[in-house]
Amino acid sequence: MLEELNALLDDYDLSLEDLLRYIKTLFLANKYLIAEARAFIESERRFHKKFKRTDLFETPDLISDDESIWVEVKDVKGIAFGSTTLSRNQLLKLISGARKGKSVYIAVVLGPLVEFIELNTLLKEKQMDRGDALLNSILLELNKRIEKTIIKYLKEGIKNN
């Protein structure tokens, strides 16, 4: 890995220090990238597979190297309860992956805590079809589960303080 990084840096005539300085400014300006990094590491630990980051504005955010697992990352630290954290388009793309046999998860990141919500199980519970009402029901249920994770985190944080 270090050899690949050094070769890449050489191609662009950058030092490791230059790159680290840039990464620092990037993460400070875009804190969701830290949440994605946290979810990336936790996905590899949980599923015992290597993952790659997809294009920046693509759903899902993370895909296992063998493409069997999809992970959409939601950094929900500090959002208002009731906020829609998944768009209909994102959900449709994730459902499409589940229908193709992928294991699909929503990684809810709250600082150091990463909770995985399995979309495949939720789809089976709701017996998903193509109707808009059912799609809205899935969105509502996912957002409820994300809110539940936030509340759990807040309660644990309060107990620990």
Image (tube, rainbow, N blue to C red):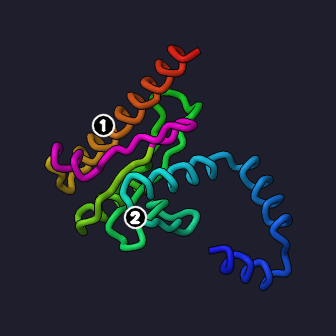
The verdict on residue 112 being magenta is: yes
Residue 145 appears left or right of 23 = left
**Up-down: is 50 above or below 78?**
below
Asked whether the residues under the numbered discs 1 and 2 touch, taking CB atoms below 8 Å apart as contact, a structural biologist would say no
**Up-down: is 124 above or below 78?**
below
Amino acid type at image mark 2: Lys
Task: Using the image as rendered, state which of residue 130 and residue 28 is in the foreground.
Answer: 28
What residue is at 18 percent from the left and 51 percent from the top?
128
Crowd tier of the residue under label 2, counting other residues whose Cα lies within 10 Å: few below 14, some 14–19, many 20 or above: some
Residue picked out by circle 1: 141
Amino acid type at image mark 1: Glu
**Up-down: is 141 above or below 20?**
above
Residue picked out by circle 2: 49
User: Where does the magenta region start and end?
Assistant: 108-126
Disc number for residue 65: none
Task: Using the image as rendered, state which of residue 142 and residue 157 is in the foreground.
Answer: 157
Secondary structure found at label 1: helix
Secondary structure found at label 2: loop
Q: Which quarter of the rendered picture does the N terminus lie within?
A: bottom right
Q: Which quarter of the rendered picture does the C terminus lie within?
A: top right
